[in-house]
Amino acid sequence: MSFTLATWNINSVRLREPIVLKLLEEQAPDVLCLQECKSPVELIPLEGFKALGYHHIVARGQKGYNGVAILSKIPMVEAGAEDFASLGHARHIAGKLENGVTVHNFYVPAGGDKPDREINEKFGQKLDYLTEMRDHFHANKPEKAILVGDLNIAPREDDVWDHKKLLKIVSHTPVEVEHLAQTQDAGAWVDVTRQDIPEGKLYSWWSYRAKDWSAADKGRRLDHLWATPDISNAGHSSRVVRDARGWEKPSDHAPVFATFDLS
């Protein structure tokens, strides 16, 4: 079977329900993973999603912060939720689709403003979160799995608008990039987006602070779509729906897509 999956940090699913519906209507992914839902699960506006065929949902939520959800047209059951770094945050949910694929949806801590855990507790929490992700995937080798989400790190030089200027900026520092690489290696995860689009600048986030975000184009690729080696070669048609960053009352992130053809 073939299915299309998308990941999107929506920055409040209730506030931005109209653009979630717009994406579902125009792009019709089979599975949509949302981060930063900023809502208790019971207040996520499901009726509109269900009306478009998204009858299956697994989620973790909390009031005003964090929150992750997977909406699916394909039958799906919950497959776990981890509280890495014991933060008590709703940052991970997993769902197993009826085709046997497990989808992990992550919202990694942003890490604050200063890339120094001695003076910035949030940066330490981010590194600890990634370390526990790494250890988890070392201990529980994933198979037939996809990992998506706002991982809040742009690892490659061409994942940011200016590599040298961002080396000391949280999201692109060498220590974060190394922690992300270790996490990726632990699960032998393949970066499907860069497998499909191996060269060139590629972004999924543009700051609200830029008056004309598109013209300035000072972006970062913070949102990722990975797969285990047993299904990564089935992934194709990767893309960032950049236009969504310019929709009415947008998120500062754009959705990232890929399609998988599985026998």
Image (tube, rainbow, N blue to C red):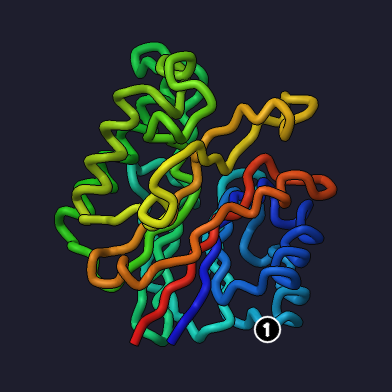
Q: Quadrant of residue 6?
A: bottom right
- Camera-side residue of 40 and 207: 207
Residue at (50% x, 46% y) in the render: 223
> Residue 45's x, y, as percent?
74, 67
Q: Few, some or many C-alpha atoms within 10 Å of disc 1 (few <14, some 14-19, many ≥20)?
A: some
- Name which residue type carries label 1: Gly
Quadrant holding the N terminus: bottom left
Residue at (49% x, 33% y) in the render: 110
- Camera-side residue of 33 and 80: 33
Name the residue furthest front. Answer: 199
Residue at (45% x, 50% y) in the render: 224
> Residue 222's x, y, as percent?
49, 40
> Residue 95's x, y, as percent?
43, 72
Quadrant holding the C terminus: bottom left
Question: At numbered mark 1, what does the secondary structure look like: helix, strand or loop?
Answer: loop
Q: Quadrant of residue 140?
A: bottom left
Q: Is residue 62 visible?
A: no
User: Residue under circle 1?
Assistant: 53
Q: In this image, 39 relative to 86: left or right?
A: right
- Camera-side residue of 105 and 58: 105
Residue at (18% x, 62% y) in the render: 141
Q: Is residue 137 above or below residue 258?
A: above
